[in-house]
Image (cartoon, rainbow, N blue to C red):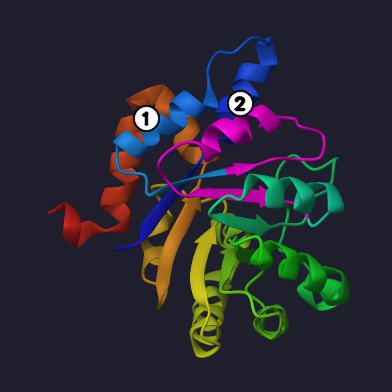
Amino acid sequence: MIRLGVNVDHVATIRNARGGEHPDPVSAAQTALQNGADGITAHLREDRRHIRDADMMRLRALPAPLNFEMAATEEMITLACALRPHACCLVPEKREEVTTEGGLNVVGQRVMLEPMITRLKEAGIRVSLFIDPDENQIRASAQLGVPVVELHTGAYAHGGAGELERLFNAADLVNECGIELHAGHGLTYDNVQPIRTLPGLRELNIGHFLIGQSVFEGLGGAIRHMKALMNPVLSE
């Protein structure tokens, strides 16, 4: 079975657009878990544009794995070590970007990343790196000893020629390196089924599409629909 991590960032985006407390991303996380989500993902950004520190504390209290997406900065490493979520996924972050634009440059940032990864591991946190499906980035991740990489599927989702083949080649190499394979970014009902066949794939993290689709069929309905596409044999 491929696990589904539901990203609740954009529930917080809607909340923050008007102020106040509604809709509550933690309530959305509870609904997600009640409808088949296997874990919750949330990205605490430097500018706190959606998820806030208090949201992370409440999400951590839920009886489900929390995947803390974050930039590789001293502030975020310190917060994560205090919070001790199930997992931390290190991602690139630019304040001016609308959404994450690509994978982490593990090759170019290895010296900086290594002690941060060590600190997270010492805090008992499972570390993953969000990377492009690139041989050099995968091998650098393996050399850093991370147990998980999450392949960035954004270029594939936007229709890039050859991107599915690139993802399959990357998945083969991830498996060869003995790393657990996750994937995510830009996935929808229409494009998730080829991705679910990546060799060794264990988890997908999906957020924006599910939150948007919940306008039409409810969050629970959207999650159940996505899980059925991800694991069609189990849904029969």
Quarter of the picture holding the N terminus? bottom left
Q: Quadrant of residue 123?
A: bottom right
- Residue nearer the viewer, 188 or 158: 188
Whether residue 110 sits left or right of residue 144 in the image: it is right
Magenta-highlighted residues: 42-71
Q: Give x and y (percent) for residue 218.
A: 35, 25
- Of 192 and 89, nearer the camera is 89
Say which residue label 2 marks. 12
Whether residue 174 sits left or right of residue 129 in the image: it is left
Label 1 – label 2 distance at C-alpha: 15 Å
Check disc 1 and give the amino acid type: Thr
Of callouts 1 and 2, the N-terminal one = 2
Task: Judge whether residue 167 is colored magenta.
Answer: no
Q: Quadrant of residue 36?
A: top left
x and y, in percent, of residue 137 in the image: 71, 78
Q: Is residue 69 magenta?
A: yes
Q: Position of residue 213 (x, y in %)?
A: 43, 32
Q: Residue at x 56, y 70 (%)?
A: 148
